[in-house]
Image: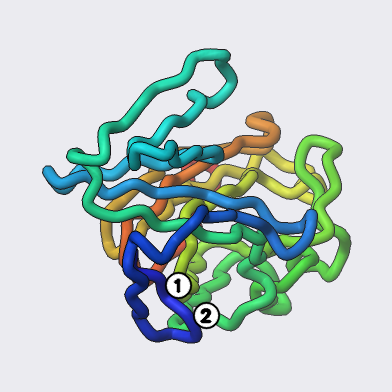
């Protein structure tokens, strides 16, 4: 069995192992298991049990059904303690910010809108997030071990006209979202299962039909 400890790979003979215990360090963390199969395919689960015969069993999300995975099909098992990391806690590695409609010019903001008021979409308040305008492109490095990108998006409630924007999300230059949104759209949501070894995510807000 190979494990990674303090950034280094270590091997333990199987006959030296009595059992394997997966645990989280606190209630703020959630374990995600990833099985890499011998054919190169990848499976992600929130629960996993390794049987005495070396086979694995997992419960399908939101169901009572269990599936078994033969040890002969398993190349590697990875697990991560997942904790939410907000992009507003980090600095972008690249940014493009061009505001042509608002004077005086306003920059994008962390955890507030560009008028330095609380973020709100459709009456829903957000303590964390990015307040941007069009045109704004922000690129971030993806922390090692990240498995998902989850976000709400939309036009801030401070905008009283029929503003329109185009929201895009790219992971390593692959586009996962390209949607036109206006003030009447309310809260929109996106969840992206991040590919293994992905390095960067880019958030784009461009001017839509009625500008923003």
Report whether residue 135 is seen.
Answer: yes
Foreground residue among 13 and 159: 13
Q: Which mark is residue 92?
A: 2
Q: Nearer the viewer, mark 1 or mark 2?
A: 1
Report whether residue 204 is seen.
Answer: no
Q: Is 81 drawn above or below residue 209 in the view shown?
A: below
Q: Is 93 drawn above or below residue 33 in the view shown?
A: below
**What is the C-alpha distance between the residues marked 1 and 2?**
16 Å
**Left or right: where 26 falls relative to 79:** right
Foreground residue among 174 and 102: 174
**Left or right: where 73 falls relative to 192:** left
Q: Picture coordinates of residue 132 (x, y %)? A: 63, 64
Secondary structure at numbered mark 2: loop
Q: Mark 1: few, some, or many residues within 10 Å (few <14, many ≥20)?
A: few
Q: Picture coordinates of residue 79 (x, y %)? A: 47, 57
Q: Is 147 drawn above or below residue 50 in the view shown?
A: below
Q: Which mark is residue 144?
A: 1
Query: Quick one: which residue is furthest to the left in this view?
Result: 39
Q: Picture coordinates of residue 89 (x, y %)? A: 68, 75
Query: Quick one: which residue is furthest to the top in this view?
Result: 64
Q: Picture coordinates of residue 60 (x, y %)? A: 49, 24
**Residue at position x 44%, y 61% in the image:** 17
């Amino acid at each position: 069995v190979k494990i990674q400890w303090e950034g280094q790979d270590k091997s333990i003979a199987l006959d030296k192992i009595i059992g394997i215990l997966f645990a989280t360090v606190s209630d703020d963390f959630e374990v995600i298991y990833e099985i890499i199969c011998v054919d190169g395919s990848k499976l992600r689960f929130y629960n996993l049990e390794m049987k005495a015969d070396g086979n694995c069993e997992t419960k399908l999300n939101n169901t009572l059904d269990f599936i078994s995975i033969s040890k002969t099909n398993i190349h590697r098992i990875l697990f991560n303690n997942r904790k939410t990391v907000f992009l507003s806690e980090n600095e972008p590695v690249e940014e493009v910010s061009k505001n042509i409609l608002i004077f005086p010019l306003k920059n994008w903001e962390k955890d507030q809108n560009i008028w330095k008021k609380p973020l709100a979409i459709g009456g829903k308040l957000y303590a964390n997030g990015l307040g941007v305008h069009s045109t704004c492109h922000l690129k971030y490095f993806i922390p090692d071990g990240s498995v998902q990108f989850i976000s709400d998006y939309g036009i801030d409630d401070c905008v009283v006209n029929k503003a329109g924007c185009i929201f895009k999300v790219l992971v390593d230059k692959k586009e996962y979202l390209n949607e036109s949104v206006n003030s009447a759209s309310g809260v929109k949501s996106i969840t992206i299962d991040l590919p293994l070894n992905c390095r960067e995510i880019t958030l784009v807000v461009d001017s839509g039909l009625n500008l923003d």
